[in-house]
Image (spheres, rainbow, N blue to C red):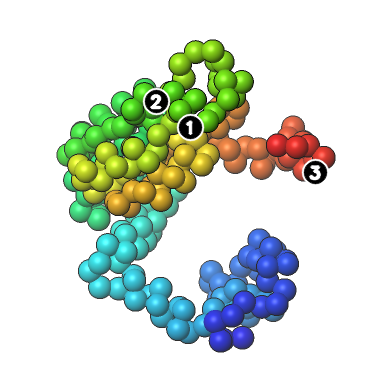
Amino acid sequence: MNDGSMPDNFGKERGCVECHTMSCYRMEKRLPDGCLSAAIGKEQLDESLDLYRGDGIDARIARAAAEVEGLYYGKLTRAEEIVAFARRIGAKKIGLVTCVGLAGEARIFARILEAHGFEPFSALCKAGAVDKSEIGIDEELKLKPGSHESLCNPVMQARVMNEKPTDLNVVIGLCVGHDSLFMKHSDAPVTTLIVKDRVLGHNPAAALYTSGSYYKRLMDSSREL
């Protein structure tokens, strides 16, 4: 297929996660039946490639990301990769969009950025100090019912960064969903330093690696989450 439509069975078979050849990477084998790469139309592909060419922000990001990957894959930490990436896209002012519970980590990363000549500016998730009840959150859904508990305000964080303006924003441990809102409203490109997972020490992949042992409950469809 090359008309830009998806194969009839594509969505039903969960897309690329069903593939075990990954032929699209090295093209050493034929693309399997129903492959997304074969289904993408030339017009769609050309439209995306046009974004990666030239001097626009999408092109600068694509080239910088490929360069950092090619030079440093498996050699640098995530924190170092962000520094290398930021330099390659010409970023100077970098927003640190942090969970209040990871302010210490954000403080350390700010010092790292300053050591490399960047200008970090941070905004906590509780910016505005508005109680959760203001948006209809019941008391029993607070971590400490009966007390003032400020809501996370990712839209405000984004607007603060937009007003600076920052050249690149780095998410540090925002909650699931709050990170989505921040990314939606951020004018500057966004990358992530830390993904919050209090249970697993901010390593959410560990749940996947142990889904056949310690975290078998992940596969329990009878559990209501």
**159 relative to 224 in the view: left or right:** left
The amino acid type, in three-letter code, at marker 1 is Ile
The amino acid type, in three-letter code, at marker 2 is Val
Q: In terms of image quadrants, where is residue 128?
A: top left
Q: Can residue 181 be seen in this view?
A: yes
Percent x, y of residue 55: 22, 69
Asked which secondary structure carries label 1, the reply is: helix
Label drawn at residue 130: 2
Q: How far apart are marks 2 and 3 (CA)?
A: 36 Å
Give the residue drawn at x 70%, y 37%: 225
Q: Quadrant of the N terminus?
A: bottom right
Give the residue drawn at x 54%, y 78%: 40
**21 relative to 98 in the view: left or right:** right
Labels 2 and 3: the sequence-earlier one: 2
Q: In this view, does 51 lie above or below 103?
A: below
The amino acid type, in three-letter code, at marker 3 is Ser
Q: In terms of image quadrants, where is residue 193?
A: top left
Q: Do the residues labelled 2 and 3 touch (CB within 8 Å)?
A: no
Task: Residue under label 1, please give it.
Answer: 135
Q: Are marks 2 and 1 in contact (CB under 8 Å)?
A: yes
Percent x, y of residue 222: 82, 40
Q: Are marks 3 and 1 in contact (CB under 8 Å)?
A: no
